[in-house]
Structure formats: C-alpha cells, structure tokens
C-alpha cells in the first residue's frame, strides 16, 4: 500500500478493499514515527485528518468516489488550510491558524482528498535546501546527513519516505523540481497561471506556482487535474478550456524531438549527474525520440535576474507581516514604528531578511532602473530564448540540479553558493513555462539524480506523456530509500 | 556598486526591520557578495527590450462594482494580536 500508485489506491478504495480511514492511518502512523528523525511535517493532526477520511469513506460507500477520494495528501505549509496552523516555516506565522482555505485546498477537498498534514519548508519558500525553516531542517530520507532540497523539502521527503502517497508543493525558482530530484521523486511546476495562487502565501507573485509531487508522472496527472483551473480570486489565474492532463499519457513518443540546451551541459554539472542524464537520453532514443542540441544563451544571467526580481517581489509581499492583523507581534516596543521594526526583526529568519533587504534596495529610488527594470528586460530575453528553442523541438531536457544532495550545513555560510544551485531550474519560471523533474538514476554516492523536462506554455500533457513512457521503460521511480 | 554600512541602515529602515550594528556588519558582507552576483546584469545591453513582468502579458481583469462578499470580520479578526470593537489595536500614532 505504501508503494502503491494513485490509481491502485483509488481502485482499492472504490471497491472497498481498503477504507480511507485504514489507508490514512497507515500513512499517518508512518509519518508520526519517521517525523522525529526526518522532520518532514510541521503539523500532524490525526483527529482532523481522520474526520476527513471518514467523510471520504461515506462518499465511497455511496459510490460517489472520484480519482482522489479518500487519498491522503501532504500539503506544504505555505497553503492556508482553514483551522490548521499555517506557518510558512516562519516564526512570524508560528501562531497563525488560518481562517480560510487556499483555492487548491478547496479543490482537493471537493475531490474528496484527505489533508494528511502540513509539511516543512524553507522559510517563506526562500531556499534550496529546507534548512532555513523556523522548525529545523528537513532530512533527506536517502541519507539523513543530507538536505532533501528546497523549498518544498518536507513534501518531497514525505513522498520519498512513503509518509504520503502524494503532496503539494510550490515552485518559484525550482522549489518543486529540485527537491523532487534530490529525493528521487516526480514533481511538476505548471505553466504560470494554470493553478490559482489564492490562499498560497506569496513569495514572488510573478513566479510562484503550486504543483503536485508524487512517485510518478502517472500520479502527477490526476493531481494536476484536481487543482488546475480558473479562479476569479487570483488576478493572474487564466481562463482556459478545461483539459485532462492524463489524456495522452499512453501515446507512443517515437518522433518526439528533444532539445538539449548546451548551456545546461557545460562546466558546473557534476560528472555523475551528467552520466545519469546520458543514460536517460539513451532510453529516450530507444523510445524513438530524436535529440537535437539547442541553445538558451541567457542561461548564465538567469540566476542574477532571478535574484533581483524574486527578492524585489518578496520585499513587497512580506511587508504585510507587521504584527497588526495576524501572526507574531514583538512583546516590547515604544511606538508603532518600533513595533514594526522589532516584530519583523524577531519574526523573520536571516535568509528572509537578506532577501527583503536586497529587494528593498533594487526597488529603491536611484536603483530601480539599473536593477529591477534591467532584470525585467533580461526576463523577456530568457522567454525569447525558450520561444526560439521550441521552434526546433517539442520538449527540452536537462539536469534539474548540478549535483546530488549536499550535506546539511554545507552551503549555508555563503548565500551565493546556495543561489548558484538553482541555475537549471530558474529559467523556466522566469519565462512562465511548465517544467517537471523525474528520477533518472543515482550519483556516485548512491543519491538520486533528477531529469528535468521543460515544455512550451500549456504543454503539460505532452510532458507527462514523455515522462510516463520513460517510467514504463525504466524503474528509477519505483526505488525507495532504505527506511523501514 | 559598493554597498556601505549606511546603505544597510537606510534599507533596513525602509524595510522596517531593526538591524543592530553587529548584524549590519555581518549582513553587509553577505549583501556585497550577492550584489557581486547581481552586477553581471549590467554587462548586457538591453536597449529596445520591453520589460517583462508577467509570462502571459495579462491585462488585469475587471468586474462589476457590486458587493459579493459577506461580512466576516469576526472570523478574520480572530487571528489578530489585539482587536477591540472590530478595530486592530496598535500603539498611538498621532499625539
């Protein structure tokens, strides 16, 4: 059951071979047992979770179950869930019990899914290692001295360690794909605007996207089906005809053109990751795909562009945390200004404060044109690079992360070291295109390697198709870390 | 661009985050390293390129100016640090 696919679980629930309560208890007990060491969850509330499981069982008993009815889903603690502590990994929200549900939480609930618990993450989604959380670092279930990646490290760890069959994460600069790669699971960042951000605590509004994390592409598809779609409450939500993201999973991929951006295979990519990628590409050739070299010339500027835009947007989004309407308020202050200054100094961690300061600076008078506007122009060049590349191929492939999982603490002394690990994941959200990561092997240290697949706008179904065909021909996605 | 301690102090004020002098020294060197990374942007000539703020070049949706939400202030204010009679309490601003 712990290793079962979504469709296997769904079918077992539908024919009442197992109840949602039984299934949920199985995952809950494992989560509670492993959380002491892995720290994947910030909040587990068995009573609330099992109440949802009982409601799902009632639906199933009436024969009203859908694809996700009764399925426990772990939620990154960035999603507001009514009645649940929602901390965003931060002290400043450590007392915030959300009075409302995020859009995606509502959608999962309407689909009959069960909230398994809130997963740990880098504070305010700012990080690539899940080390900056107020609640302590998450550990990689493959090797517990190593990071699971970030910022959706808790969600990735939960799925990899079989504490949850599926999870939701968010991706701004790579925060779904990179932890998926480092933990050996599959994760998808949809096209910007496809999934509503209402109730998803904002980091960088023009980049943030919610996406599913699971053991396979075949499991990602029904999750995306449940959460995608227009929501009037998100001003960036797109009105488009409904689509079934699983519709072409089984199509053969012979003839599909795969583009390899040469900038993604240059120096900086670890040799063992490169080897695993090469083996994966051989599999795609065997499936009948053709491979063509393309170029994304702006790749080297993607990281600095992102580290102007994302902190700038964050400095604006995090201005709301001031101790007035919700969250932590400093205990001592002489006046209103001091209340703000101390609340934010005490409530935010070091990385968050750094990014707010950078963002404030690049938006300030005298620097706005040289930094923020310049970065926005470079953003358009990055998007143009992808448009040019997709003229010559159907999907792009490359590494998700330059290395396998690094040791906890290895990159925390120098922020720039950490930022540079995002080099392959940053371009896709800058352009707004969809991107996913699937496991494709192991590095020389026995740690998972992720293959990144990037697609043109709204091409998620084709990306899931090519990922699924690879997963039918290989078994990397079936490997689990050696934990009892 | 050389960032100074004064700059750190000024930005911290703008961002409403209290930074002690010791913290300012530490964060200064970290920020200088990050700005070293960001400086590379200046090497590109972007004359004639339109800034891009959004992937789909969306236009903000408008809607009819009618009331659609019920009054839920009790529920939403239940999470506030200090509330009284529907008002958020903060230290006195105007003498």
Image: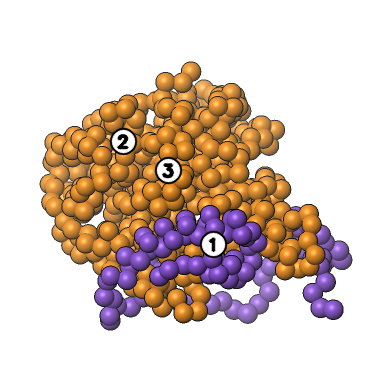
**SS class, disc 1:** helix
Q: Residue at x 18, y 38 (%)?
A: A278
Q: Identify the residue at image location x=50%, y=79%.
A: A365
Q: Left or right: A345 with respect to A401?
A: right
In this rendered view, identify the residue nearer to me: A247 or A190: A190
Q: Are marks 2 and 1 on the same chain?
A: yes
Q: Which residue is mark 1?
A: A356
Q: Secondary structure at mark 2?
A: strand
* Left or right relative to A8: residue A107: right
Occupied quadrant, residue A318: bottom right
The numbered mark, 3 or 2, whose residue comes first in the sequence reads 3
Q: Could you classify mark 2 by the number of other residues whose Cα lies within 10 Å: few (under 14), some (14-19), or many (20 or more)?
A: many
Q: Residue at x 87, y 66 (%)?
A: B85
Camera-nearest label, 1 or 3:
3
Q: Compare marks 2 and 1 and give the one earlier in the sequence.
A: 1
Chain B, colour shown: purple
Residue labelled with disc 3: A411
- Give me the chain letter of mark 3: A
Which residue has dot 2 on it? A449
Q: How far, Cα to Cα, is label 3 from label 2?
A: 19 Å
> Callout 3: helix, strand or loop?
loop
Q: Nearer the viewer, mark 3 or mark 2?
A: 3
Q: Colour of chain A?
A: orange
Against A123, is B82 above or below? below
Residue A2, above or below B83: above
Whether residue A248 is visible to the viewer of this picture, yes or no, is: no
């Amino acid at each position: 059951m712990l290793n079962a696919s979504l469709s296997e679980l769904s079918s077992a629930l539908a024919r009442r071979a197992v109840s949602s309560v039984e299934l949920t208890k199985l995952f809950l007990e494992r989560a509670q047992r492993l959380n002491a060491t892995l720290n994947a969850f910030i909040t587990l509330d068995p009573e609330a979770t099992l109440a949802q499981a009982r409601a799902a069982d009632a639906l199933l008993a009436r024969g009203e179950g859908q694809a996700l009815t009764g399925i426990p889903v772990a939620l990154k603690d960035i999603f507001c869930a009514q009645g649940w502590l929602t901390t965003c990994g931060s002290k400043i929200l450590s007392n915030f019990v959300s009075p409302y549900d995020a859009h995606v939480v509502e959608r999962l609930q309407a689909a009959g899914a069960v909230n398994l618990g809130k997963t740990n993450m880098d504070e305010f989604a700012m990080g690539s290692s899940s080390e900056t959380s107020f609640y302590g670092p998450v550990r990689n279930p493959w090797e517990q001295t190593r990071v699971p990646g970030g910022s959706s490290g808790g969600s990735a760890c939960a799925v990899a360690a079989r504490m949850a069959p599926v999870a939701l994460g968010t991706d701004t600069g790579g925060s779904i794909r990179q932890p998926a790669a480092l933990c050996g699971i599959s994760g998808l960042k949809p096209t910007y605007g496809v999934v509503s951000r209402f109730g998803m605590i904002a980091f960088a509004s023009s980049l943030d996207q919610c996406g599913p994390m699971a053991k396979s592409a075949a499991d990602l598809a029904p999750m995306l089906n449940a959460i995608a779609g227009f929501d009037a409450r998100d001003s960036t939500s797109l009105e488009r005809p409904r689509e079934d993201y699983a519709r072409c999973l089984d199509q053969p991929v012979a003839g599909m053109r795969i583009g390899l951006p040469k900038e993604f295979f240059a120096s900086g990519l670890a040799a063992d990751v490169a080897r695993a990628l090469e083996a994966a590409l051989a599999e795609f050739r065997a499936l009948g795909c053709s491979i063509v070299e393309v170029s994304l010339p702006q790749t080297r500027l993607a990281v600095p562009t992102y580290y102007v835009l994302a902190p700038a947007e964050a400095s604006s989004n995090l201005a709301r945390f001031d101790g007035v309407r919700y969250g932590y308020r400093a205990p001592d202050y002489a006046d209103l200004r001091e209340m703000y200054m101390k609340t934010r100094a005490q409530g935010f961690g070091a990385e968050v404060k750094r990014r707010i300061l950078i963002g404030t600076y690049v938006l300030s008078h005298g620097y706005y044109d040289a930094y923020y506007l310049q970065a926005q122009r470079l953003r358009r060049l990055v998007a143009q690079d992808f448009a040019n590349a997709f003229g010559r191929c159907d999907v792009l492939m490359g590494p998700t992360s330059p290395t396998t999982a690094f040791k906890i603490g290895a990159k925390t002394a120098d922020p720039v070291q950490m930022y540079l690990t995002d080099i392959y994941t940053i371009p896709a959200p800058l352009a707004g295109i969809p991107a996913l990561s699937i496991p494709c092997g192991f590095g020389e240290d026995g740690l998972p390697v992720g293959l990144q697949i990037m697609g043109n706008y709204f091409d998620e179904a084709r990306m899931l198709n090519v990922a699924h065909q690879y997963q039918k021909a290989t078994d990397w996605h079936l490997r689990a870390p050696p934990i009892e | 661009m050389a960032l100074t301690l004064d700059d750190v102090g000024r930005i911290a004020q703008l961002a409403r985050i209290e930074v002690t002098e010791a913290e300012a020294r530490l964060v200064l060197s970290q920020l200088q390293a990050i700005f070293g990374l960001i400086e590379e942007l200046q090497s590109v000539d972007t004359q004639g390129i339109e800034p891009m703020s959004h992937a789909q070049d969306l236009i903000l949706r408008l809607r009819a100016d009618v009331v659609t939400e019920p009054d839920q202030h009790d529920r939403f204010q239940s999470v506030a640090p200090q509330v009284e009679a529907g008002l958020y309490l903060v230290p006195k601003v105007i003498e």
